[in-house]
Image (spheres, rainbow, N blue to C red):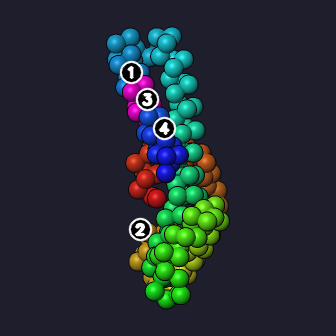
Amino acid sequence: PDDAAHLLFGWFLAVVVLVQTDAFLSTVQRLYGSDFWLYSIVHAGLDSVLSVFKLGTTLVLKMILFPLIFGWGLCLITEPMFTFSTEDMYAFFMETPLLFALLQWLFGVSYMLVVTFCLLELRFVLHPEVLANIIRLPDPEQQMLRNLLLESVPKIAQRM
């Protein structure tokens, strides 16, 4: 629990520092223009850091956090169907936390793949315009990494 709190605090602190640096750069640009030497150096570095931060956050959310949340939720929802209880799950977690987390992640990833498959099949069964706003079919020419780096954070959050 302490490690998770430290990790979340560090992530929050990184966001605050990046936002404050961006605000500082906006002020420098407004006062001195974009030709100021400090602005050009710091702006290039900040763009690179923000790109890495955005990519890392998206990957952590989609590949680690969402599957863990879905797996844990599935485990709690399906508990009455099986012979284990919440106390059994807690004891299993306390005994082998890494194995417990890996199983929850596996259940979550499996759930995400099944839902994705079902939605793609529904798109072909139903009229294509019914699910057009929810499902975006991948474009073969699409460069996902470039699009992720060029899109704004609110747009990425809306798609997730």
Foreground tag (3 vs 2): 3
Q: CA distance from mark 1 to mark 2?
A: 38 Å
Q: CA distance from mark 3 to mark 2?
A: 35 Å
Q: In the drawing, what numbered circle is on residue 17? A: 3
Task: Look at the picture and state if 156 lies above or below 98.
Answer: above
Say which residue label 2 marks.
133
Residue 107: x percent and y percent?
A: 59, 73
Say which residue label 1 marks.
24
Residue 75: x percent and y percent?
A: 51, 76
Mark 3 or 2, nearer chain start: 3
Marks 3 and 2: CB-CB under 8 Å? Answer: no
Q: Residues within 10 Å of mark 3 (few under 14, many from 20)?
A: few
Secondary structure predominantly adopted by residues drawn in magenta? helix
Foreground tag (3 vs 1): 3
Query: Does residue 11 appear anywhere in the picture?
Result: no
Residue at 46 percent across and 72 percent down: it is 73
Residues shaded magenta: 15-21
Q: CA distance from mark 4 to mark 1?
A: 21 Å
In the picture, measured across the screen, residue 45 lies left or right of residue 21, that is right
Q: Secondary structure at mark 4?
A: helix
Q: Residues within 10 Å of mark 4 (few under 14, many from 20)?
A: few
Residue at 39 percent across and 16 percent down: it is 28
Foreground tag (4 vs 1): 4
Q: CA distance from mark 2 to mark 4?
A: 36 Å
**Residue type for callout 4:** Gly
Say which residue label 4 marks.
10
Q: 45 or 63, which is in the foreground?
A: 63
Q: Quadrant of residue 102?
A: bottom right
Mark 1 or 2, nearer chain start: 1
Q: Secondary structure at mark 3?
A: helix
